[in-house]
Image (cartoon, helix red, strand yellow):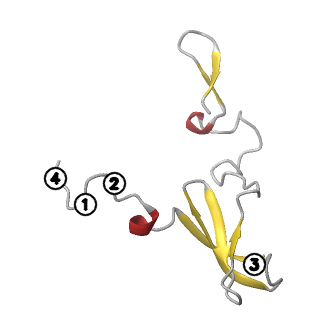
């Protein structure tokens, strides 16, 4: 397959593809203490935002964020099989899909 990218570059890098997700949230900067609505970015399992007042980058990796695909289901019995935390093994035992 031909590519216009240099060797070793996939095109999925943050500098090329941008963040995986971005969402507006109200956040407080850990450096200057200003609370404001800002854009929270995520890429490659990292989450962060930049303060609009002092330009400090605030790391949010320590915050647990629920998977948005799973929040609507009360338990595994309501969840589609492709999202279930356990799936039936063809050999008869249960195995975790994660």
| Label 3: how many Cα within 10 Å (few below 14, some 14–19, many 20+) | few
Q: Which residue is mark 1?
A: 5
Outermost residue toward the top? 91
Q: Earlier in the sequence, mark 1 or mark 3?
A: 1
Tell me the residue that label 4 is attached to. 2
In contact (CB < 8 Å): disc 1 and disc 2: yes
User: In the rendered structure, are the residues bearing label 1 and label 4 in contact, judged by CB atoms less than 8 Å apart?
Assistant: no
| Mark 4: few/some/many CA within 10 Å (<14, 14-19, 20+) | few
- Answer with left or right where residue 34 lies relative to residue 9: right
Residue beneath disc 2:
10
Secondary structure at badge 1 equals: loop
**Residue 47 at x, y percent in the picture:** 64, 63
What residue appears at the point 79 percent right and 79 percent down from the top-left corner? Answer: 31
Cα–Cα gap, marks 1 and 4? 9 Å
| Residue linked to disc 3 | 26
The disc, 2 or 3, on the residue closer to the chain's N-terminal end is: 2
**Which residue occupies 55% across, 9% down?**
91
Q: Between residues 56 and 34, which one lies in front from this camera angle? A: 56
Extreme-bottom residue of the structure: 53
Q: Mark 3 or 4, which is nearer the eye?
A: 4
The quarter of the displayed image where residue 24 is located? bottom right
Q: Residue at x 60, y 10 (%)?
A: 92
Label 2, residues with CA under 10 Å away: few <14, some 14-19, many ≥20: few
Using residue 42 as the reference point, say whether residue 9 is left or right of it.
left
Q: Which of the numbered marks, if any, corresponds to residue 90?
A: none
Task: Mark 1 vs mark 3: give the one in front.
Answer: 1
Q: Residue at x 16, y 52 (%)?
A: 2
Q: Position of residue 26 (x, y in %)?
A: 75, 78
Q: Position of residue 46 (x, y in %)?
A: 62, 58
Find numbered disc 3 in the image and state the secondary structure of the residue it sits on: strand
Tell me the CA gap for discs 2 and 4: 12 Å
Q: Could you tell me residue 7's position as x and y percent?
A: 26, 53
């Amino acid at each position: 397959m031909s590519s216009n990218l240099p060797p070793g570059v996939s095109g999925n890098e943050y500098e090329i593809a941008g963040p995986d997700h971005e969402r507006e949230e109200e956040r407080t900067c850990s450096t200057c203490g200003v609370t404001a609505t800002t854009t929270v970015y995520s890429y490659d399992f990292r989450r962060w935002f930049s303060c609009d007042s002092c330009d400090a980058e605030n790391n949010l990796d320590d915050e647990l964020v629920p998977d948005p695909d799973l929040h609507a289901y009360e338990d595994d019995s309501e969840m589609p099989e492709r999202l279930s935390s356990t799936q039936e093994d063809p050999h008869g035992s249960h195995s975790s899909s994660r």
